[in-house]
Amino acid sequence: MLGLDLSFLNWEIISKFVKNGFIFSVQLTVIATLGGIVLGTLLALMRLSGKQVLMLPATIYVNGMRSIPLVMVILWFFLLVPTIIGRPIGAELSATITFVAFEAAYFSEIMRAGIQSISRGQVNAGRALGMTYGQNMRLIILPQAFRNMVPILLTQTIILFQDTSLVYAIGAYDLLKGFTTAGKIYGRPEEAYLLAAVVYFAICFGLSYMVKRLQSRIAIIR
Amino acid sequence: MSWDWKVFLNDDGSGRTYLQWMFDAWGWTLSVAVSAWVVAMVVGALMGTLRTLPNSPWLVRLANAWVELFRNVPLLVQIFLWYFVVPKVFPAMREVPGFVLVVLALGFFTSARIAEQVRAGVQALPRGQRYAGMAMGFTTAQTYRYVILPMAFRIIIPPLTSESMNLLKNSSVAFAVSIAELTMFAMQAQEETSRGVEIYIAVTALYAMSAFAVNRIMAVVEKKLRIPGYIVAGTAGGGH
């Protein structure tokens, strides 16, 4: 069909080449999402703290990260992290550190919007009950902010999953690399790209459909 | 660690300095981004408009499928598809230069995001605007041309700004198919000179400056197009 031959793919190739790449891509996505949300929430709290000494560095970090292409950030970390910690690290570990640091900037913008969406009355109610800043954040504001932002956080995670393919720049072994390696070895590079596209599409389309369903179910609980 | 900025004056082996090479690469980055921006705006406006048509369910479905298709495959994979797979499947495409294929890939990828913004902009307008067009005896095409789209585009200028900046940043992915743009330069010059930090700082600064310039240009556009008496605020654009 169309000068392509997709029949070379079988389960053996999948388990030999694609599986490990897929596991790394998923692992990278999960770690970067969790790490990014934690770091991002901290950055958001810093930016909303009203204290110049916390706001300034957080703002510079977030805006700096957001104005550079992800590929350049990946290259930067791959160059700098080994010099900072004094020993060479693999492309996979470097990619993981990069994605946590990079995604933190994007997740912090989402969390900041989420925190700001909580009405003033909630904050004041917490205060009136005698809660400290920490208690107020932990028990009143963050749970609501997080819940309101779940669909957007998940959407960002899907984008993040797609972006993991950019570890190509430093040669880490991810889902895409699994397909391209198999394609090279079996002399079918074009077919491998096409199959990779189909797999990415199926995963991302499926996930975004689920997010849409979720969104309509948990919408507005005020 | 000591700085060595003189590295930019070294010869890269073909009679030009690394500085010249870098500015050539910047030119490629800007050409890819500007050309892809034109493709993305034209296709995105068309697809976004189709998605809001009142009585053409098949056109709506077609445009929705377009958006889902180009939004759910990573940009790098799309670039590989255009660069390697399309010429193989369609022999007529074999003569098309790689630059054009990358522009199409980046343009269509971004068009899905722009279509999403255009749809949101059209749907943000009060229904009365459409009825007003109909009451004037406009055809659907005229209603869109004279009533709906001029307002919708003004509403979505802020998210279009961030999509334009995203597009500029995304042009860096073209390194993967050996387009001689900034990221490609950064990787090769880093390898050849071993002065990665200086090279990366310069390239990063050029990217940041370009993104900032896009931001300012769009701000001027927004100001020029503002209709006195209307305060329109757009929704924030996501992604990167």
Image (tube, coloured by chain):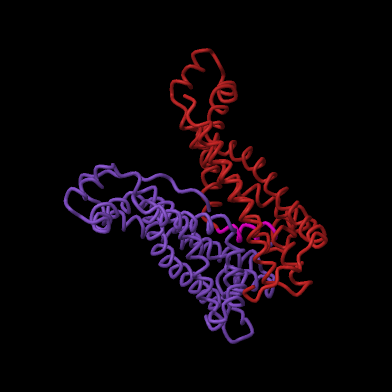
Q: What secondary structure do most residues of the magenta stretch adopt? A: helix
Position of residue A37 in the picture relative to residue B157 (left or right): right
Q: x%, y% of residue A50?
A: 48, 32
Task: Answer yes or no: is residue A144 visible.
Answer: yes
Q: Nearer the viewer, residue B68 or A24?
A: B68
Q: Does B76 appear above or below B231? A: below
Position of residue A170 in the picture relative to residue B88 (left or right): right
The reply to whether the magenta stretch includes residue A53 is no
Identify by letter the chain in purple. B
Which stretch appears magenta? Answer: A69-78
* Residue at the far bottom in the pictured view: B15
* Residue at the far top in the pictured view: A129
Position of residue B159 in the picture relative to residue B91 (left or right): left
Q: x%, y% of residue A75?
A: 65, 61
Q: Does A42 appear above or below B2? A: above
Identify by letter the chain in red. A
Q: Nearer the viewer, residue B67 or B8?
A: B67
